[in-house]
Each structure stands twice: as structure tokens, then as C-alpha cells.
Amino acid sequence: MATSPGVEWEFDRITLSRDLSRSAVTRLLTDRAEHGGWELDRVRISADGTRRVILRRKIIRMVRTA
């Protein structure tokens, strides 16, 4: 997805333990997407099994009209 000029993003970084099951991580990320408006930007799985997830959502600026 190409970013448009003037679009601002808010990022949220989450570190998830290797002890969480794949289904638990899916539920957590789905909940954040449905209720918080977040979308998945990047997932990195390190050698020890921890997941580093970066979520993003657009910042919507209100424009005052006369």
C-alpha cells in the first residue's frame, strides 16, 4: 500500500511472548483492528520466538469550516 502525501500515521509497538499461541495472538490483533482501527504494519519473529508487532492507524485531523 503506497502512502499518500499528507497522510499521517500513529504507530503502536507490541512485544508478544513466545508462550502465547498463534490463535491467542490472532485474537489479540483482530480485537485491536476491529475496535481500535489498527492495521498490521510489520511482524518480526526473533530467534528466541518473541514477536515484535507494529500496528498503525491513520491520524484524522478535523478541518474547521466556516
Image (cartoon, rainbow, N blue to C red):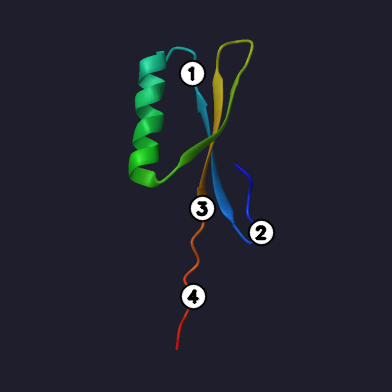
Above or below, 2 relative to 66: above
Where residue 6 sits: x, y (%)?
A: 63, 62
Q: Which residue is mark 2?
A: 5
Which picture quadrant has residue 38? top left
Residue occupying the point 56% across, 45% down: 11
Above or below, 29 relative to 2: above
How far is the residue under mark 1 from the one under mark 4? 41 Å
The crowding category of the residue bearing disc 3, from other C-alpha atoms within 10 Å (few below 14, some 14 to 19, many at least 20), is few
Q: Which residue is mark 3?
A: 58
Q: Quadrant of the N terminus?
A: top right
Q: Is residue 14 left or right of residue 32?
A: right
- Sequence-first disc among 2 and 1: 2
Q: Are marks 1 and 4 in contact (CB under 8 Å)?
A: no
Q: Which residue is mark 4?
A: 63
Which circle marks residue 64 in the picture? none
How far is the residue under mark 2 from the one under mark 1? 36 Å
